[in-house]
Image: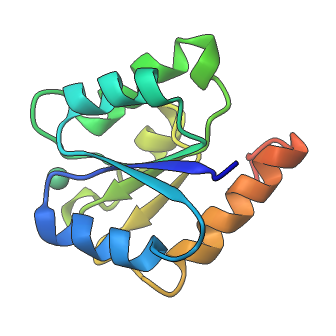
């Protein structure tokens, strides 16, 4: 079965960029544009990995992450935080809040796919993700 990746991003250009980066790699891509939609879609679709912008309308990415982590279905789902440049220095807060890794914008489209593939691979093997 294809692995499902949920992309949560309110900026349409960034969303398009991430989609293009991951297209054709055999993933099912799901999209959400705000925090509430992200929560709903995550619960409904049970994605294998989530790319989560931290600055989102309605509910920010950290809050969504914290809520997901409280449910057993999402206790180990890899979550990659997308952080704006202005958030530099806040990375620790995101990791402590339940994100497994963070990617600073502008997104490095060469690195992101490899990072995702590796996280999914580790996840499948049941390895902890703490090396990220
Ligand atoms: Mn945003």
Question: Relative to 40, does residue 115 appear above or below in the rendering?
Answer: below
Tally the marks: 0
Scheme by which the image is coloured? rainbow
Residue 82 pos. (x, y %): 36, 57
> Left or right of 2: which side holds 27?
left
Residue at position x 81%, y 41% in the image: 128
Between 132 and 33, the one lying in front of the other is 33
Residue at position x 53%, y 29% in the image: 46
Q: Residue furthest bottom?
A: 110
Residue at position x 59%, y 46% in the image: 100
Q: Quadrant of the C terminus?
A: bottom right
Residue 96 pos. (x, y %): 52, 34
Question: Relative to 132, does residue 118 appear above or below in the rendering?
Answer: below
Residue 10 pos. (x, y %): 15, 51
Q: Residue furthest top?
A: 71
Q: Residue 75 is drawn in which quadrant?
A: top right
Residue 4 pos. (x, y %): 54, 47
Between 55 and 25, the one lying in front of the other is 25
Residue at position x 77%, y 46% in the image: 123
> Left or right of 117: which side holds 81?
left
> Left or right of 7: which side holds 35?
left
Q: Residue furthest front?
A: 1
Question: Relative to 132, does residue 125 appear above or below in the rendering?
Answer: above
């Amino acid at each position: 079965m294809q692995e499902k990746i949920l992309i949560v991003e309110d900026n349409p250009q960034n969303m398009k960029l991430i989609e293009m980066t991951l297209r054709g790699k055999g993933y099912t891509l799901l999209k959400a544009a705000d925090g509430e939609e992200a929560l709903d879609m995550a619960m409904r679709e049970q994605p294998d990995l989530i790319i989560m912008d931290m600055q989102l309308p309605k509910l920010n990415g950290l809050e969504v992450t914290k809520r997901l982590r409280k449910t057993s279905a999402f206790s180990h789902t890899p979550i990659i935080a997308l952080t704006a440049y202005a958030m530099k220095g806040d990375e620790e807060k995101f990791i402590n809040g339940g994100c497994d890794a963070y990617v600073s914008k502008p997104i490095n489209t060469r690195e992101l796919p490899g990072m995702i593939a590796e996280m999914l691979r580790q996840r499948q093997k049941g390895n902890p993700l703490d090396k990220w």
